[in-house]
Image (tube, helix red, strand yellow):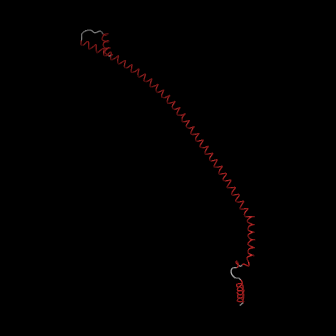
């Protein structure tokens, strides 16, 4: 029974309050000045905490981040300039090496051409010497052949004249006749 009395008392008490309060308690205009006061106090406290503690920390982090970004950008520019300088030096070295290689090739060509000209001159001299020797040999063979032809012609003419005629022919006149006939 005691529990029943307690429950009845609570129900009666709740009914009394229900009759007093109409609607939501947040919208009770009689408590607005008190709520506005505590709202202002809370906002000022939040503002003070943010402006004194959180915002300076955030500002220092942002400043540090901006400094790091600025340093990184400056370092990147330095590295970019160093890369451009290195590329320019590489291209210059490459151009110098190419021009030096061209000079070496030109010098080698000139040396080879000199050696080739000297070898051609030596070969021409040897060919000229052999041609002169061959000319001498041909001239000697021709002279020998002409002498042999003259001797054979003289012998044949002597045999023909002896066979055709019984008269004695002078060898000198026979050689002169054969010689004039061979010359043309």
Quadrant of residue 140 within the rendered picture: top left
Q: Is residue 116 above or below residue 2?
A: above
Front residue of 41 and 178: 41
Is residue 147 rendered to the left or right of residue 5?
Answer: left
Is residue 94 rendered to the left or right of residue 22?
Answer: left
- Give the image location of residue 36, x and y in percent: 74, 74
- Give the image location of residue 114, x and y in percent: 52, 30
Q: Is residue 8 above or below residue 36?
A: below
Quadrant of residue 49 within the rendered picture: bottom right
- Give the image location of residue 38, x and y in percent: 75, 73
Quadrant of residue 50 within the rendered picture: bottom right
| Quadrant of the rendering where the N terminus is positioned | bottom right
| Quadrant of the rendering where the C terminus is positioned | top left
Q: Is residue 15 above or below residue 179?
A: below
Front residue of 104 and 16: 16
Front residue of 144 and 173: 173
Q: Is residue 158 above or below residue 126?
A: above
């Amino acid at each position: 029974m005691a529990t029943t009395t307690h429950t009845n008392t609570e129900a009666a008490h709740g009914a009394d309050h229900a009759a007093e309060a109409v609607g939501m308690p947040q919208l009770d205009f009689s408590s607005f000045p008190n709520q506005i006061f505590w709202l202002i106090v809370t906002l000022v406290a939040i503002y003070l905490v943010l402006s004194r503690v959180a915002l300076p920390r955030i500002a220092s982090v942002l400043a540090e981040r901006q400094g790091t970004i600025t340093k990184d950008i400056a370092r990147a520019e330095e590295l970019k300039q160093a890369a451009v300088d290195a590329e320019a030096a590489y291209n210059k070295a490459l151009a110098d090496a190419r021009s030096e290689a061209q000079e070496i090739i030109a010098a080698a060509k000139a040396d080879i051409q000199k050696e080739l000209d000297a070898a051609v001159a030596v070969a021409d001299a040897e060919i000229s010497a052999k041609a002169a020797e061959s000319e001498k040999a041909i001239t000697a063979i021709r002279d020998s052949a002409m002498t042999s032809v003259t001797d054979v012609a003289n012998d044949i003419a002597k045999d023909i004249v002896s066979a055709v005629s019984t008269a004695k022919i002078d060898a000198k006149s026979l050689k002169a006749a054969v010689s004039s006939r061979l010359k043309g």
